[in-house]
Image: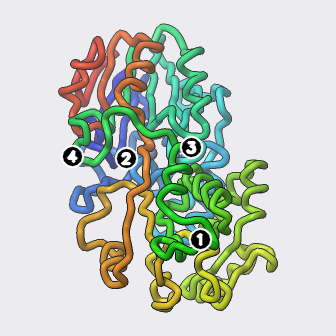
Amino acid sequence: MKILIHRGASEIGGSCIELMHNGKSILLDYGRPLDANAPIVPHSLLPERISAIIASHLHQDHIGMADSLAVPVYIGTQALAMLREAAVWVSHTPALDNAVAYQPLKAFEVAGFRITPYPVDHSAFDSYAFLIEAGGKRVFYSGDFRDSGYTAYKTERLFVQPPQDIDLLLMEGTTIGSVINSAGFATHGNTKEADLIDMICTTVKPAGCTVEDNAGMVLFAASSQNIDRLVTAYKAANKLGRKFVIDAYAYSMLKATGVKSIQSALANMLVYIPQYQRVKIKNEQLFDKLCPRKQRIFIEELAQSPEKYLILYRNAHIYDFSVDMLKNAIVLYSQWSGYLTGDSHIERFVQQHGLPLRHVHTSGHADIATLQRLAQALKPKVLVPVHSEYPELYSEYFENVKVVSEINL
Ligand SMILES: [Zn+2]
């Protein structure tokens, strides 16, 4: 087996790893680079020899280019359902018309490779690592993972029951670098997802509080594809006696998970459809995307008592919300800090309205101790860094490291 890391050997984003065996190739992920100036297709990739794409999860930097090759894309069932919904709302989202859904821990064969998907915890719902076998060799690809979210048990199961005799481990190292590396990811001691609930509740006031500061509407800026984070916001809102208000896109994402507990929570959320989504629903006849009527909330109700709500923030909300609605409001920023450039839309919004902006976030990626647990569980003969800005630092933390972009097994 030959491994060619077309992108990701020394960067985060645009992941693209080719495995070759017997003249046939598969790609592990095919993402868009985070750097908008980087070429979309890696120079070293020869698309004509690729038989299939095996996608670890739905993040754009892992799957954003998957539609550009006319080959089957293998992906988790729920990730596929979410991507197809997301493609309706978000541009550049691959709709994956040529997709095949795989199942957790059920091995499948493609182009002479045998692939077993191992579920892992990550900020993208339905994420996987893979065991790939061909020509008597066994390669493990970590994908993106952590053990601090609501599905930490998945990663824990991998640590406790790891596959044996791994010849080579391709392991992500997003957080490797300084304490906070230049990509803004914390190296040590990731806060657990569930800890964010208390962080939110101590930052903002419960509904009906008479103290004015931060007692108005709570605007919560998070990705609608980060299901864990929506659940966190929902639980915090419940504790605060507020109602969690989402929009039509977040409603679609939560519904697409198909998970029972999430559907029960979803039934207790309210849905405010901003003007731009109303126009889109009408123009594109997306009426099947609407929630039941009783869950809808309209601008008049929000304006009447904004202090009752914790609402998912959208840049376009500012065109809907009046100055009065934003009195004593607070904005919680629950995404990667690297998106805060000083001149981002949300920063301009809070400046314009004189609102406080607080960062309430935890990484979707494993810290070093967790990465070490995976390496120790799998005991690979060779460990090759991927999805890291600092591959040269791996040997400080792990054994048998080889920093390469091409290797024969
Ligand atoms: Zn990811």
Circles 3 and 1, Cβ within 8 Å, touching? The answer is no
Secondary structure state at the residue bearing disc 1: loop
Q: Earlier in the sequence, mark 1 or mark 4?
A: 4
Task: Identify whether 109 is placed above or below 50.
Answer: above
Q: Nearer the viewer, mark 3 or mark 1?
A: 1
Secondary structure state at the residue bearing disc 3: loop
The quarter of the picture where residue 106 lies is: top right
Secondary structure state at the residue bearing disc 2: helix
Circles 1 and 4, Cβ within 8 Å, touching? The answer is no
**Where residue 162 sits: x, y (%)?**
55, 15
Which residue, given by chain and number where applicable, does mark 4 sit on?
182
Q: CA distance from mark 3 to mark 1?
A: 24 Å
Which residue, given by chain and number where applicable, does mark 1 sit on?
209
Left or right: 178 in relation to 145 = left
Q: Earlier in the sequence, mark 1 or mark 2?
A: 2
Q: Name the quarter where the C terminus is drawn.
A: top left
Q: Which mark is residue 271?
A: none
Secondary structure state at the residue bearing disc 4: loop
Q: Residue at x 62, y 42 (%)?
A: 76
Q: CA distance from mark 2 to mark 3?
A: 42 Å
Identify which residue, 199 or 406, lies in the foreground.
199
Which residue, given by chain and number where applicable, does mark 2 sit on?
47
**Where residue 309 sits: x, y (%)?**
62, 73
The quarter of the picture where residue 288 lies is: bottom right
